[in-house]
Amino acid sequence: MIKRFRSGIGSWYPICAGCIFLALGIATLIHPEVLSYYSIGLDEPSARTAMRAMVGGGEVGIAIALLFGGYIRLSLSQRCQIAAVIFICVGLSRLFAVTIEGADALTMQPFREAAIELTLGGLGLWAAQIAKPKLDVSSI
């Protein structure tokens, strides 16, 4: 039962992570004003275009690599690692930004989001270890 659960995590993680990135990317492409939650001013068409391209397009690109990476010979483990590295980098960058801005001036929101991103990243590293193909030493 535990072994089956662990192998399920390894195979489902890149799909779940890909769906997260796809949903966020499409939402940003269609309605970049969703970023106003972070007090990002998108009053100008050039700002909305940039957000659609960089954030929305970037997240859709990551999602495609995670969801369909097998077609370009990315292993399950590699796809897990890609998602994990992105989540961890975003989470650590958020924490770094908190230190620059000063934690006193912020709400709990950046800490909560960083905790989610780091948790998803840690889960991805674990899934990557599970998804690694085992070396068959009997054929050596």
Image (spheres, rainbow, N blue to C red):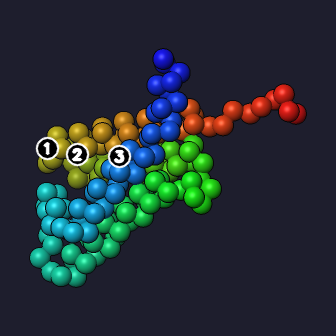
Q: Disc number at residue 140?
A: none
Work out whether residue 102 or residue 122 is closer to the camera in this orientation and state it.
Answer: 122
> Disc 1 vs disc 2: Cβ atoms closer than 8 Å?
yes
Question: Few, some or many C-alpha atoms within 10 Å of disc 2 (few <14, some 14-19, many ≥20)?
Answer: some
Q: Residue at x 36, y 36 (%)?
A: 119
* Amino acid type, residue under disc 1 in the picture: Thr
Above or below for 102 versus 54: above
Q: Is residue 36 visible?
A: yes
Closer mark to the observer between disc 1 and disc 3:
3
Q: Earlier in the sequence, mark 1 or mark 3?
A: 3
Number of numbered discs on residues? 3
Q: Earlier in the sequence, mark 2 or mark 3?
A: 3
Residue 50: image location, x then y, percent = 28, 76
Q: Which residue corresponds to mark 2?
A: 110
Q: Residue at x 11, y 76 (%)?
A: 43
Farthest residue toward the right? 140
Work out whether residue 7 or residue 105 is closer to the camera in this orientation and state it.
Answer: 7
Q: Disc number at residue 107?
A: 1
* Amino acid type, residue under disc 3 in the picture: Gly
Question: Few, some or many C-alpha atoms within 10 Å of disc 3 (few <14, some 14-19, many ≥20)?
Answer: many
Q: Which residue corresponds to mark 3?
A: 91
> Disc 1 vs disc 3: Cβ atoms closer than 8 Å?
no
User: Is the C terminus in the top left, top right, bottom left or bottom right quadrant?
Assistant: top right
The image quadrant that residue 48 belongs to is bottom left
* Amino acid type, residue under disc 2 in the picture: Pro
